[in-house]
Amino acid sequence: MYSYSRDIIEEYSLAPGEYVVIPSTMKPYMSGDFVLTIFSKTDAQVTPQEGGHDHDHDHDHEEEEETRPVTPTVQPKPEEEVSPARAIFNRYRDQDDLLSALQLMKLLNDQLSAGSRSGFSYDNARSLIAMYDTKRIRMMAFSDFETLWKKVTEYKDLFKSLDKNYNGFLSDEEILMALGSVGWEVQQSLLRLLVSRYSGSSTTLESFIMIMLRMNKGSNVFTERSEDGSITMTWTDFSELMAM
Ligand SMILES: [Ca+2]
């Protein structure tokens, strides 16, 4: 985080560990006073860096020359290799390495909806957690996020390839093509229902992703449990589906 501003307020979800906050001036070799306030929802110890020192404002110019920072010669350790999905997840997860609906919503909007007018709603995020929460913890663990993210990026690319006039919307016909391209035969009337349920009149990227994820979930459930093209469900199985 680096910003040319006198006043910065930032909120982060951080994994347990040690972090260093380094306030700095924008231009090199200038000094300045900083007020740093840290609020934490959990126990956190904040201590000044040992061996750190305040720059003396009264010292003469020569002294300042001597205290100029020296470029470190030690190469920083290469970061542990993480998958792109892991890197994104890590930016939003909480202390327990999980995503809440709010954190998932922020992640999706930051990563996918830049410049979009609609964005993912809190309700969308909760629904996605219900769909992918294999651990039944009502939060999203990384293994579930990885599955979700793979699908989300796949459907994002599909949306882009179908939105031929680049207006950010898909027509019903284009969505039918999308559903057909992944092997889902859907009647026009059902499509109209899906679209009006998830997107209203025209379908944005976010609504499209929600429709596809829901269809994908339904299709997976059906494939897992069907025999000869039909499905038998217990009430427990069925009511679990309704919870999504
Ligand atoms: Ca379009």
Image (cartoon, rainbow, N blue to C red):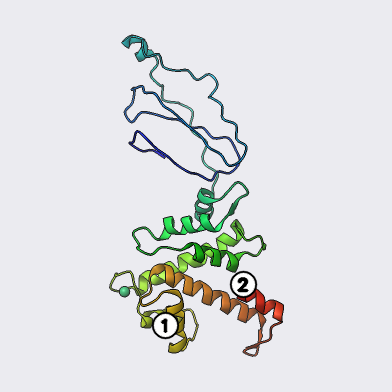
Question: What amino acid is found at the position of numbered circle 1 in the picture?
Answer: Leu
Q: How far apart are the alpha carbons under marks 2 and 1?
A: 26 Å
Q: Quadrant of residue 136?
A: bottom right
> Within 8 Å: ligand 1 and the Cβ of disc 1?
no
Residue 205 x/y as whole percent: 40, 68
Q: How many marks?
A: 2
User: Looking at the picture, does residue 240 appear above or below residue 56?
Assistant: below
Which residue, given by chain and number where applicable, does mark 1 sit on? 176
Rendered residue at 52%/54% (across/down)? 103
Rendered residue at 46%/59% (across/down)? 108
Residue 142 x/y as whole percent: 59, 56
Question: What amino acid is found at the position of numbered circle 2 in the picture?
Answer: Ala
Mark 2 and mark 1 residues within 8 Å of each other at the beta carbon: no
User: Looking at the picture, does residue 115 appear above or below residue 9?
Assistant: below
> Within 8 Å: ligand 1 and the Cβ of disc 2?
no
**Ligand 1 picture quarter:** bottom left
Which residue, given by chain and number where applicable, does mark 2 sit on? 243
Tell me the crowding category of disc 1: few under 14, some 14 to 19, or many 20 or more residues within 10 angstroms, Cα based.
some
Ranked by sequence position, the earlier of labels 2 and 1 is: 1
Label 1: state its secondary structure. helix
